[in-house]
Image (cartoon, rainbow, N blue to C red):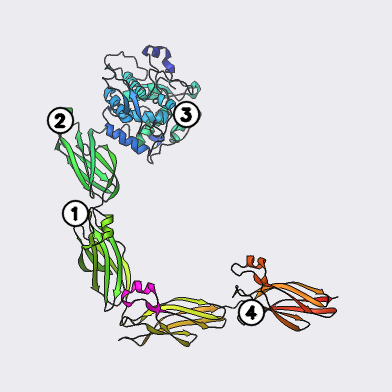
Amino acid sequence: MKKLLAMAASVLAVASVLVGLQVSGPTASQEPASALSGSSFQAGNIISDANFYDGTAMTADQVQAFLDSQVSSCTNSNCLRNGRFSMNSRGGDAMCSAVTGGSSLSTAQIVTRVSAACGISPKVLLVTLQKEQSLVTNRGPSAAVLERAMGYACPDNVGGRCDPAYAGVGNQMYWSAWQWKRYSNPPGTSNYFTWFNPGATRNIQYNVPVSCGTKPVNVQNKATAALYYYTPYTPNTAALNNLYGTGDGCSAYGNRNFWRMYSDWFGSPTGKATTAKGSLDGVSTAYNAVTVNGWALDTATKVGTKVVVTAGSVTGTFAATGNRPDIGAAYPAAGPKHGFSATLTVPGGAQQVCVTAKAADGKSDVSLGCRSVTVAEGSPTGSLDSVVANQGGTVTLTGWAVDPEAKGAIGVRIYRDGAYVTRVSAGTMRSDVAAKYPALGGGHGFSTTVRTTVGTHEYCVTGVNVKAGSDRRIGTCRTVVTPGSTPIGKITAIKTTSSSIRVSGWAIDGDSTESLTARVIIDGAGHGIRADRARQDVAKTYPAWGTAHGFSGTWKATPGKHTVCVQVNGVGAGPASASIGCKQVTVTNAKPIGSLDAVTGVSKAVQVSGWAIDTDTPGTSIPVDVYVDGVGKRVVAKTSRPDVAAAYSGAGAAHGFSVKLPAKTGSHSVCVYAIDSQAGANTTLGCRTVKVP
């Protein structure tokens, strides 16, 4: 993919290195930063020397955390997040110090080893991996893509093979960093790379065709010059106006994309580089807590620094002043007092824990990485199983509560309608709790009876926390009605047929467990009934009263609207009776339907056939009246008619009729009527005139 620089092809051959010339388009997977604008691009100051040549800008843990944040999961073993790659060990030279290789290194190890050896920022390497091959965000790159990871010493033509001496992730990163360092003409090398030297205005092409023109650029630093040696084109106005898209036929995108990706990922490439350093060495969890440890310092001072720890919405700032002799050995000028071990109280569940090291002046910082952990919840948990009303103005609450940090019984607080009532101990044996929490045992149940007042009340229970965590509501609050001296109950169902009304419900009196009497009043007419039928739902809600409190009765009614009320008779100190509700219902009586299929004159008779059904009583065969010249005969429509059964689900087939009635030779009038099963209006199925031969 890379060619020799066109402007100096002959002299670059002496360097025996092919120089990176990737002209990459916008990266689809790169999310734009909302504040970034192409108008901020400075062609002569793309990145500062401080940021470009900071070989220790990120630790291996920080690089790994960054890669993890860019890819949620990998689809093959080539993914930079999880992949293992080889890199040759090399001795030092004027560009890079000695570097230790290996056959199974992580991307983070390769990036940080190369960066430290060659003095090129890990951020620059990561941005270039993305700019050249979209490798940072690629979940499953091919081997061919990995071969040309940085585009170094690879031909431009699609599918062209890279020079084997420079191919592969480890080689690509090392030699790209080596070459960037060479562009600065370090001591021990010739002053060869001069045509983009800082301090002068250079005419830099917009793209390969000379016809696209050039732009005069005042190159301000070595790092910007290195980018132009690597990719010798500057973005035109069209490329900058569509920062995350394409420009025109003369647009080149390599240096634009480098600047854009660096800005999106790491902030301004020309801003002041932070002097904060550090490492997140470990993250551990306890009940409702995360503990982080590591080190942080400011390379510009011996003064202790601070770290900011975040877990979800919880943030804490801690001093990094613990004794770390290993850090003192690595940074003699800073001394050893730069360790930290900090604990943050957090909610239970999945947490993303991140740590940032602050510079001593507080004006800059550096991420030390993030870890995903699951934090155990130390707050109580349990269940409010039931709240039931008793005679005498009390309710009984049962349930269980445990605190994961306590084997013994914990306290629970009872609340009615939000007001505190009492505290009891959850210490009775519950085998189901023991099965669920074997380490805590089963002595965590509670059952308590408290006084209450007549009416509807909401009861809630809170478990009292023991150590980590906080007091926590146990289970779901429950609402219960406490009966008083006034009878209570409910009309639970009213069903109608074409000629009747069926009323069902229940009733109790708080003063007695006896079955009550009631009156079902339909349009003002009362009907006595006893509420003594079994109702398991009533017993479940009011166990002290038992099941014998249901009523159900059926009364005849004409078609039309009716008002149904139920009045319950009291037995205690309260009123003699009380209404438990009224409802409006409508009784309907549909007319029968059917068909007069055929009327035929036969020898000395008339043959009549068809079908009829009353949808109020679809399973019943109804009568049909057949009249010949005004003389009627009643038959029942009960012969099989599968077509009727198919048309009226659940009605069955017994709805056909076929009858032969005697008749003299000549013309006759035949009429057929379907008779309503509930004594309602009948239906004329039709009249025919027929001749008998």
Amino acid at pointer 2:
Gly
Discs 2, 3 touching: Cβ within 8 Å: no
| Residue 558 picture location, percent across and down | 56, 83
- Which quadrant of the figure contains the C terminus? bottom right
Q: Which mark is residue 467?
A: 1
Q: Which mark is residue 328?
A: 2
| Label 2 secondary element | helix
Residue 604 visible in the displayed image: yes
Sequence-first disc among 2 and 1: 2
Horizontal side of 69 relative to 310 (left or right) equals: right
| Residue 467 picture location, percent across and down | 19, 54
Q: Which mark is residue 251?
A: 3
| Residue 67 picture location, percent across and down | 34, 35
| Residue 150 picture location, percent across and down | 39, 25
Magenta-drawn segment: 532-553
Amino acid at pointer 4:
Asp
53 in relation to 494, above or below: above
Amino acid at pointer 1:
Lys
* Nearest-to-viewer mark from 2 and 3: 2
* Nearest-to-viewer mark from 2 and 1: 1
Discs 1, 4 touching: Cβ within 8 Å: no
Sequence-first disc among 2 and 3: 3
CA gap, disc 4 and disc 3: 88 Å
| Label 3 secondary element | loop
Sequence-first disc among 4 and 3: 3
Whether 95 is among the magenta residues is no
